[in-house]
Image (cartoon, rainbow, N blue to C red):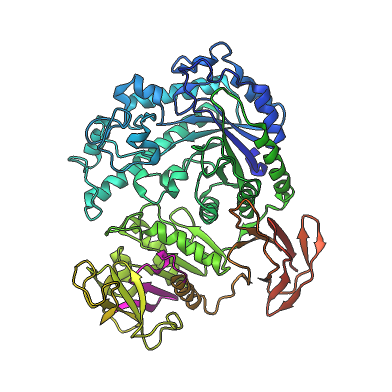
Amino acid sequence: MWYENTYRRHLLDMHIDDWDDRFLSEFNADDYFDNLKRAKLNNAMIYLQSHAGHCHYPTKSGHLHRCLESRPHEVKRLVDKCRSNGIYVTGYYSLIYNTYEHDKHPEWRMVGADGYSTRAGSTANTQSTDFASTAQSRYGHCCPNNPGYREFVKEQMREMAEYFTVDAMFFDMLFWSYYCYCDHCKKRWAQEVGGEIPTVADFNDPMWLKHRERRRVWMGEFAQFVTDYQKELTPGMPVEHNVSAMMHADGFSSCSSLVNDACDYAGGDLYGDIYNHSFTCKFYKNASRNQPFEYMFSRCQPGLRNHTMTKPCDVMLSSVMMTAAHHGATLVIDAIDPVGTMDSRVYDMLGQIFEFEQKYEPYFKGNMVEDIGVYYSLKSKYTPHEGSMTSHTGAVNAVKTMLYYNVPVGVTGDFYKFDGYKVLVAPCHTQEDAADDVRILDYVRNGGNLYISTAWNAPLVKELLDAEILGDTIHNLLYLAPAEDSMGILDDYTVKYPMNFDGHASQINLNGNDCKVLATLTLPYTDPTTSKFASIHSNPPGIATDIPGLVYRKYGKGTVIWSAVPIECCTDELCREVFANIINVLMEGEKQSFVSDAPINAELTLFKDDKTLYLNAVNLNEYKKLMCINSFTVKVYTENEPVSVKFLPDGDNVEYSFKDGYTCFNTGELKYFDMFEIVCK
């Protein structure tokens, strides 16, 4: 399929209204195409319609952008010119976000509990995306449960399929911008669940959790509905839905694996730091049905709201090479000027960046080597308490800690396998993920090593530890006091000076005697939520308990370490060290696939293609002035001495040594990105 070797992609945002004659008046297919060629791109995602709801083609079902009426075929001319000159075209269509049709069809609107949409002035949607807040009332949302809107979408898709010839279709905004309480959502709830849809966010209320579960199902069903109809219209055509909302810290958007299941490959736009970029690449790679996945980022600094602020070349190059380090496709998002022009300087810069990236593309081969699998839940994105310590926070920080310590790490979940991981990390699981309990238990029972935190998924923890679940502490600040033998995990702490943790802890009672308690909970002298204190500025440890804080147990052929507190959620360097110690204990007896003294501003990834290994090193740069990284040492486990080690793409031989199954070499100074090829016997 065309996308398998297409890594340089582009999207030009064209969410332009048509109330001014100047808008898109200077849009020109030839200029657009020339910029694409200047940037050395081989895939262009082109707007056939936009969030504004205006179509960029002659339409009978919708509304042609008024400023294109005199030249309605200009976008088609662009599409055809790209395809006839070696640039594959992905058609863009905005689902749910359609301001024109929202205004025209009040009955299609997504509405809050007060019966109004955000564009119509609703103040009831206290939980919403940035794009859907009342201050952003320029966005109109149509409910995917509305049968009238669905028929409209089908008619638009039919029109586009008949008018354009494209290589793929991309459907944007497959998530709930806020909780909808329109008549059709109420009707569907009544049919499938019964009663009234809950309107109060209470994560200790089973019906509220059921509400979130139904939203996931409904959005996934809508995504599949769109994919199925597109493939009916254009058999064999790849379909991609924007799954970036899967990376949201809060799960209310309900973009889940069900949406991803309707995609031929995973992709979406993100705007976090370089570590979030790395995490997302790992997620997209393993969640994607086909490779490469597609990572989208904005050329604007920090995002598209800053229309004239372009990221420095070195920052964009680091982003592109981070995706390349995971063998993914980069899609750069630009935004058209309202009059229809583009800044050619941006495309000159992109040309330089992609010229650098392009020379590594022939080596994007094999499967990524991942010793540690971090379970990323698309459901358990909440806590029974206030605060941000959730499965999302835990997963993102766990990966970051592994990168700090140069441990090969990947992201898994209900979308990917567990087999092959030397350690599985399951942060802050709740019973929302109970469907995966059997897989987790089988993984450990068959010899896997598991770290799991909290007892929010009570049945799973009860089975793993043979424990009684007693609920969480009322204290939101406490300590982990090491046992006499904490297996090296808490060696920097003592019973008198235990490890501090800001948050609640899960309490359990161990039924059997086959568990080893590595740490117990120590409480402060007073409840930190009251005004009574021992020390006015802090809450020092004061009450020792025998409540298990860290527990080690053999389960089947495998091993479990359970923590009463989500240590992996903490960003403090001392907590990262404790979490890394836990992983070291679980890794005992296992050969780490690579070991390095690389600093924390470098990331290493390793791919295996039969008998050839590809080691990638990327500079985690986020600054205009690039800081080069001094040479560091890498030891790659090859078992036997290799045939050769080469520096790519030049093919120069690299000096190496071999000892204890590891091939060792120095990288040299790392500027942006380096790749090494290790050919094994």
Q: Position of residue 16 (x, y in %)?
A: 49, 25
Is residue 553 located in the magenta-colored stretch of the structure?
Answer: yes
- Above or below 518: residue 363: above
Q: Is residue 655 visible?
A: yes
- Spot the residue most to the top: 70
The one nearer the camera, 321 or 339, is 339
Residue 191 relative to residue 152: left or right: left
- Above or below 128: residue 337: above
Residue 351 relative to residue 331: left or right: right
Q: At 32% from the left edge and 25% from the top edge, which residue is drawn?
A: 108
The one nearer the camera, 343 or 115, is 343
Q: Which residues are magenta?
A: 547-573
Question: Which quadrant would residue 176 be assigned to in this image?
Answer: top left
Q: Is residue 236 visible?
A: no
Q: Position of residue 155 (x, y in %)?
A: 44, 21
The one nearer the camera, 568 or 240, is 568
Q: At 42% from the left edge and 70% from the top edge, which residue is drawn?
A: 451
The one nearer the camera, 170 or 595, is 595
